[in-house]
Amino acid sequence: MLPNPAPKFRYYDAVAYKRSQRGAAAYTDYLRTGKLERRAWSEPEKRYLTYREVAEHTGRKLEQAGTVTHERINGFHRSIRFPKLIFHRTLASMPHLGYCHVTVSNTRLPQHEDVQWSFYMANFYSEIGEGERFFRAISPRYRRMYFAIAIHPSETEGRLEIDRTVGEDGILFHTHDPEDAMRNVLLLGARTEELRKIIRAI
């Protein structure tokens, strides 16, 4: 899954930068406490981060969110259990953005007896396209995106690809709403119509 081309970003360590500005508050501390700390304060400098550092930080955040999401969906009902399969990818040209795979399972859909699917979450929202431009028109309107795609084995051994014969070109659902996402995942995992009725009523 590759992003659209984007302008080059520069990232810096905001926490370290704020700490480096401590010298500007030294005079205020003196007025408050009557003590002036003896320290050579230098002009604050921003430490710019590499794309790799930004991607690593983004990945940790995504996988933490993915783990919490997995716990939520597995905590709904004892008869619905999904395997935990957490991994992430960041966008090459915008490493502060990325998506996380949460779980994979099988379900039965109208006209499709056995559909394997994967559930993802992302820290951005976009339209979902085709081919290499899977994420299209990344939007600042929403800060999250949740989606599930149908998958099947590809011609390349050991790899999976989107099964575009299922759903809307392989997309089972696509939303910015976490409650709507949870409802859709649970419906995919529910094995009885009685349980589906309960989930739809949430």
Image: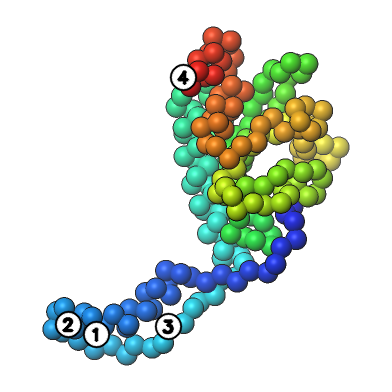
On the picture, is 175 further left or further right than 81? right
Sooner in the amino-acid sequence: mark 2 or mark 3? 2
Residue 113 percent coordinates (x, y): 75, 16
Q: Residues within 10 Å of mark 4 (few under 14, many from 20)?
A: few
Marks 4/3 in contact by CB < 8 Å: the verdict is no
Q: Which residue is mark 2?
A: 31
Q: Is residue 63 above or below residue 169?
A: below
Marks 1/4 in contact by CB < 8 Å: the verdict is no
Residue 177 vs residue 58, the one in the foreground: 177
- Residue 82 appears anywhere in the view: no
Residue 191 percent coordinates (x, y): 59, 14
For marks 1 and 4, give the CA distance. 60 Å
Residue 185 percent coordinates (x, y): 58, 28
Identified by mark 3, the residue type is Pro
Identified by mark 1, the residue type is Tyr
The residue at the far left in this view is 34
Q: Which residue is mark 1?
A: 27
Sooner in the amino-acid sequence: mark 1 or mark 4? 1
Q: Residues within 10 Å of mark 3 (few under 14, many from 20)?
A: some
Secondary element at tag 4: loop
